[in-house]
Structure formats: C-alpha cells, structure tokens
Image: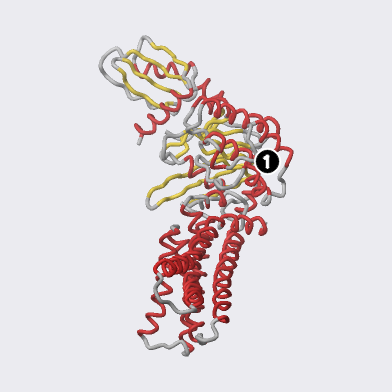
Amino acid sequence: MMRTLVWRDFRRFVPTYIAVGIMFMIPYLFVAVDGAYIAMSGRHHSANWLRDDLLVASYFNVIIAIAICAIFSATSIGGDVGDKTLGFCRILPVDPLIDAASRFLVMLSSSFLAIGISVLVFMVFRSIDHERQIHQDDEQRLVLMGSAAVCIGVGWLFSSLVGSVGIATVAGIAGAILVPFALELFDVSPSNWLYVFTYSVISIACIVAGTAIHVRRFQNSS
Amino acid sequence: MTSQKNHTSTISDAVIDMRGLGRVFGRQWAVRDVDLEIPKGRSLGLLGLNGAGKTTTIKMLMGLLRPTAGSVSVAGFDPAVDSLEVKRRVGYVPEQQFIYKWMRVREAVVYCKAFYPTWDDATCDRWLKTLELDPHKKVKHLSKGMVVKLAFVLAVSHQPEVLLLDEPMAGLDPIAREEFLDGVVQTICDRGVTVVFSSHTLGDVQRLADEIGIIHDGRLLVHRDVDDLLTQTKRIHAVLPNGDVPTIEMEDVVCQRVRERELLVTVSSYGEDVLGQVRSAAGADHVEVEDLVLEEVFKDYVRGWRMAS
C-alpha cells in the first residue's frame, strides 16, 4: 500500500520537478546572457568572469532550493485539497496516517534532493575558485538549514489548513524570512542554543499540526 | 404524519442498519432520526429534493461523515469506528468524480487495486471492456460519462458487499446513463450486492429499486417496497357538495388539498374502508380513485410534510 502511495506522490510531483528544473536554470541563463553581452559589447572583463558568475549563480540556487522546499511542502497536501482529488483518496480504504506519511516522505526526499543538488553544484564551483577562498561558516549553514526546515513546516501546515498551493508556498517562504528576522530582533544569534531550539520547535509544531489537520480532514470532512 | 415502514427485513439479515441517525451542520439538522434497515441483496432508492439529506446519509454510511446522533452499521461494522473495514466492503460512486486527471485508466485501476485484498482482475477487465474504457487513455481525456463509468468499474472490481451510488448519473447523456444503469443491474443480479442510491430521475429509481425511501428536511418520510408503495398509495378525488373544506384526520392520509371544488386526498394504504371514511368526512356523493406514478407519490409525500409542518 505504502509503495503505491509513494508512487502516486512522486508521480504527482512530476510537474513540480519540471518547474523546479526550470527555476534552477534561471541563474545560469543570466550567466549566459552576461556572457553574450560581454562578447558582443567587447567591454573590459576579468579573466575569470565565467567562474565568478557561475559561483554566484550556484549560490543563488542554494537560496532558491530553500524556497523550493516551500513549494514541495505546499503541493504535497494543498494540491490534492485544492483540486478536490483528496475526495478520491478518502473513499479508498487508506489509513490517513499512512497517506500523510507517504506525502511527507516524498516531500522531504524531494526537498533534500533539491537542496542536495544545489549545494553540490555550489561546492563544485567553490572548489574551482581557489583565489576567492569563500568561507562558509557553521552559523551560515545553520541559518540555511533552519530556513529550509521552517519553509517545510509552515508550508506543510498551510497546505493542509487552507488547501491552496500558492498561499502555502508564500506562507512557507514568509516563515523562513520572518523567523530569523524575529530572532535578530530579540538578539538571539545563531550560536545561541535558543536559535536552533526556536527553529526546531516551529518546524516540528507546524508539521504535527498540519498532519493532524490532514488526518482529521481525511477522516470526516463536511 | 409519521414515518411509515412496511418491509420484511429483520435485524439479523440487515446489511445496512441505521437507528436514530442524525447529523447536524452548525445548528441545522441535515439528517434527523432516520431508522432504516436494508437486507442483503436489496436495493434502496433514496428520493428527495436538493438538500433533503440524501448525500449526508450516504456519506455517513461510507464513513465520510460522523453521525451527530444515533448509530449506523454497514456490513456489520460501524463506519464511524471501523471506517477502513467499511470502505473495503463498500463500492462508492459519488456525484462528482475526483479521480486523478493525470492518471491513465490502467493506472487508476492499479492504484485502487493496491488497497483492496478482494480485488478481482477478471471482473475489472470485463467491465472495462463492456463499458469500452480504453486502459491507455488519460482520465483528463475522458468525457464525464466515461469518468463515471470508470468510477463504477473501480467501485465494483473489489467485489463489494454494498454499493453506494450518490446521484452518479446526474448530467449524463441518455446512452451513458443507460450503460451505467445496465452495469448496476447486472452487478445486483450477478452478486446479490446490496445497493443504496439516490437520484432525481424517478424512472431510474423505479427501474433499480426494490425499496423506496423518501427523505425531506432530513427526515425519512416513508420507506416501503416499490410495488407496495405504488399499488397502495392512491389519490381520492371527492367533489365537495358545498364550499366547506373538511379536515380529514386519518393515519393513512399522506396529503390533502383542495383544487377548485374537488378535495384531493392521497392515502398510503388504500382500501374500501379508507374510501368510505373519506367519502363521509367530505360529505361527497361522487368520489374517484386515481392510481399514482412514482413522481406523484413523491410530490404528495413532500407536499403533505410541508402542510403538516
């Protein structure tokens, strides 16, 4: 049963994977446009312009990957609620918790894949750039990971709450922006244990609440 | 007017058993005090206006809505408690189909098959062929009638004990409707499945149903065998000798109204004694008895309820 549900959820995500692929290409498209402009204008440029541009593009994709986490979590439940196909799942003898687990598993693995690919590409370009010595510290990594977790959690909650992919995506991204902003406001630095704690609590609470709402809707909606 | 029951089922052979079933939405009772037993192999047609409570009743049978009051049992299980067990034993075709549009017909079949241990490939293939459903076609490329047929195939291929059909034929063209009805009739004949269905098309109801339930304002006004309902329910026309409109207080009266100088009394159990009572109460010399078609019976039950309340 679980295998069928996982197949369904991967299959449902196919249009999202295509959209994500296109989104990942956009920064590199800008690199291509920049290259074409340099070639045509003949303006002065550094010898390593391509390497620099690719590095910036790949870093930009890491940021995009975090927003993509919100899209995945928003689509996982919100897509089916929005187009009412959840009604089809509800008439089948499917345990709502297993249904939620399948959606979560596929969403999480898709998010990891998006982040993993973008980070891998970034690391490859960074390793080529010996001169620049880009330093990425643990705090920066923590902020990125925390933002991804909040994107997933808030997106998941809103996707089961409002059943709209658009609203849930915006909510997920807004959460990832607002949480570090609020922590900054209260002078909580990433080195503080409260920082990790806040991110963890918000993400887990949102996932638990979103799952509970989904299960309840699955069992008996009006 | 009281709810009338005149069928032969007993508690022990009832596949569907509702007792005092009720459901509230906000402050409004969508279904109230419904008592109903349906024995194995029988088909019940639910008739009612829009918003009468038919869909709510069927959803409670399916375990998609939790009853606010009373109890319900389907194939020996309480849908509110053993929802999965009920869903394994019930085939359900709702009014609107929400099968994934990106799926091909074959994918929809494989997807549903995974959830039913009793799924029968031979039955499924036979129905796909009979209903001319192309397994390679995507759901989004099927017409509305074809999607309903696919929903029917998915509902019957796991050999359900109970079939719940909630106005699935609404909006279908006559050919698709006919093929769908044929499918249901064949399933009833082949497997002795118990069927509950709702429809606004009384011809369909009359063709499929062994028993009729008329629901209005969430209440079950009548539950009787179709033949019994149609042979026993009669409309008596009594010409009033003067302008006085009598009130006839008899248990059997479904509805009474005056049209020009004629008193129309619809009774649920016609007999000579009933005719005599109407004649004397109306003080009429001339009375006529009219046989009613299902549509007129339905209308008079609803009219009678409206007048009484």
- In the depicted structure, whether residue B17 falls above or below residue A17: above
The front one of A8 and B56 is: A8
Q: Quadrant of the N terminus of chain B?
A: top left
Q: Is residue B254 left or right of residue B133?
A: left
Q: Can see residue B210?
A: no
- In the depicted structure, whether residue B58 falls above or below residue B184: below
Q: Can see residue A64?
A: yes
Q: Position of residue A211 (x, y in %)?
A: 52, 65
The front one of A23 and B306 is: A23
The front one of A210 and A51 is: A51
Count of numbered labels shown in the rendering: 1
User: Measuring 39% from the left and 12% from the top, which residue is drawn there?
Assistant: B287
Question: In which quarter of the view is residue B290 placed?
Answer: top left
Location of mark 1 (residue): B157
Q: Which chain does the residue under circle 1 lie in?
A: B
The front one of B278 and B257 is: B257
Q: Residue furthest front?
A: A42
- Indicate how the structure is coloured in the image: secondary structure
Question: In which quarter of the view is residue B240 placed?
Answer: top left
Q: Position of residue B160 (x, y in %)?
A: 66, 42
Q: Position of residue B41 (x, y in %)?
A: 66, 34
Q: Position of residue B31 (x, y in %)?
A: 45, 44
User: Measuring 41% from the left and 87% from the top, which residue is drawn there?
Assistant: A188
What amino acid is labelled 1 in the image?
Ser
Q: Quadrant of the C terminus of chain B?
A: top left
User: Measuring 50% from the left and 43% from the top, which residue is drawn there?
Assistant: B57
- In the depicted structure, whether residue B272 falls above or below residue A39: above
Q: Dot 1, crowdedness within 10 Å: few (<14), some or many (≥20)?
A: many
Q: Is residue B285 left or right of residue A206?
A: left
